[in-house]
Each structure stands twice: as C-alpha cells, then as structure tokens.
Amino acid sequence: MSNSIALGLAALIVAAILADCLLNSGGATLFLARKTADLVDYLKFWR
C-alpha cells in the first residue's frame, strides 16, 4: 500500500466519523465500537 492510498483511506475514515457525529450524534460510531469490543472478547475466548 502506498502512502497516497493510506492517506486517502485515513481521510475517508475521518470524514465518515465526522459525518456520523454531525448527522447522527455519533450513534453509528458508538455501535461499531461496542461491536468491536464484543468481537475482541469473542476472539480472546478462542485464543
């Protein structure tokens, strides 16, 4: 992955989080954070 692709993806992620915060009060970001925490707990079980 080149630096320009990495910067473009980072900018896209930041824009999506900003849009969520402005339009949805951060609901989708909070949902994804909770589901990611659940996934980490699930993967710890299989370790």
Image: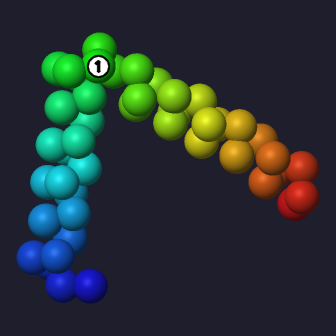
The outermost residue toward the right is: 46
Under circle 1, the secondary element is helix
25 left or right, relative to 47: left
All told, the count of numbered labels is 1
- Residue 46, how many percent across, how many down? 89, 58
- Callout 1 environment at 10 Å: few (<14), some (14 to 19), or many (20+)? few
- Looking at numbered disc 1 in the image, what kind of residue is underneath it? Asn
Place residue 15 in its image quadrant: top left
- Nearest the viewer among 44 and 21 is 21
Could you tell me which quadrant the N terminus lies in? bottom left
Q: Is residue 18 above or below residue 39?
A: above
The residue shown at (70%, 46%) is 40
- Tell me: 28 left or right of 7: right
Q: Residue furthest front?
A: 23
To which residue does mark 1 refer?
24
Which corner quadrant of the image does residue 23 belong to? Answer: top left
User: Residue reaching furthest bottom?
Assistant: 1
From the top left corner, tell me how far across and down residue 27 is, in percent.
40, 21
Residue plotted at (18% across, 32% down): 19
Residue sitting at x 23%, y 42% = 16
Q: Nearer the viewer, residue 15 or 10?
A: 15
Horizontal side, residue 43 vs residue 21: left or right: right
Residue lying at the far left of the rendered structure: 4
The answer to which image quadrant residue 8 occupies is: bottom left
Instruction: Note whether 10 is above or below 1 in the view shown.
Output: above
* Residue 10 to residue 41: above or below: below
Measuring 81% from the left and 47% from the top, which residue is drawn there? 42
In this picture, is 26 found above or below 34? above
Q: Is residue 19 left or right of residue 30?
A: left
Q: Quadrant of the C terminus?
A: bottom right
